[in-house]
Amino acid sequence: MPALPWILLAMATAAAWTDRFRPWVPTLLGGTIAVAAANGLLGWPAGLALGLLAVMAWAVRENRPTVVRRVGHGLFLVLAVALSAHLWPGFHNPRVMGPAPITPDAVPFTLYLNLDKPLVGLWLLAFVPAVRALRPPGRTLAVAAVAWLATSAACLAAALILGIVAWAPKWPAGTGLWLLDNLTFVAVAEEALFRGYIQAGLARCLRHRRWGEPLALVAASALFGLAHAGGGLPWVILGGVAGIGYGLAYRHGGLPAAILAHVGLNATHFFLFTYPMLRPAA
């Protein structure tokens, strides 16, 4: 399997963070699409999704009529859900790990290198740059560290009490790839969508209400919890708690702080506890 599509996609995502390098995004994304298609990783429905993203990028520009921008944002949310949940056809994401249990008592784990979900984060960084909410680097790192430790303590303690994980320090094969995927694609897409787009968007809509920002944080966190419904009610609760931590990190440290806190919690879970969860008793 060629690594080039994901290298180019990572470069496009990195370029989208800055005004200086953002003009390179179309070229890098075009290279990603060309190489992926040549290797059978994309089908024609994926091309339709990419075309829709391009139309939505045009529609949400500030100089468009209000109704056009609202329709563009609404359609993007629908497509973002489909891409994030791998519901849109045409993306042939390769499996690079599993399915196999990482520890004997864990449920089988599978890792795919996705081309669909990362497009959500890339689109937001490239065409809705306000989602970044950048802060001074020192503040970002301090907020990220506090959010990582506090959110990890809350979520993993709750997971232990609920009996869905156990203490299990490890360094399994494929660790580097898992960590790189989390840092480069998974956390960027999820935090850009739930914190930079949904939470910040709701906060703007509710800015004239007394409890507008807290309500926006709670609502975005609840949606983030529901996004984990596939794991059952405990994961919805834990996802909601994690969302509160990431939302506070975003509010005080910007999008990079939320991403780092997210990766930090995922890594703490992966390296020190059962991953992804204990196998149910027979």
Image (cartoon, grey):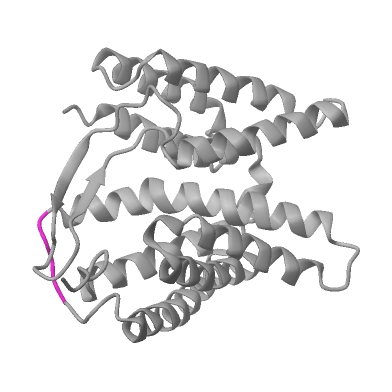
Q: Residue at x 44, y 64 (%)?
A: 262
Q: Is residue 68 left or right of residue 53?
A: right
Quarter containing the C terminus: bottom left
Q: For this view, does 127 lie left or right of residue 157?
A: right
Query: Vertically, is 157 above or below 99?
Result: below
Up the image or down, 198 lies above or below 155; here it is above
**198 or 109: which is nearer to us?**
109
The span picked out in magenta is 169-173
Residue 170 is covered by the magenta coloring: yes
User: Which picture quadrant has residue 105?
Assistant: bottom left
The x, y position of residue 217, in whole percent, is: 67, 66
Residue in the image at 15% along x and 49% along y? 99
**For residue 170, above or below residue 173:** below
Residue 258 in the magenta stretch? The answer is: no
Question: Farthest right residue?
Answer: 208
Residue 254 visible at all: no
Outermost residue, front direction? Answer: 282
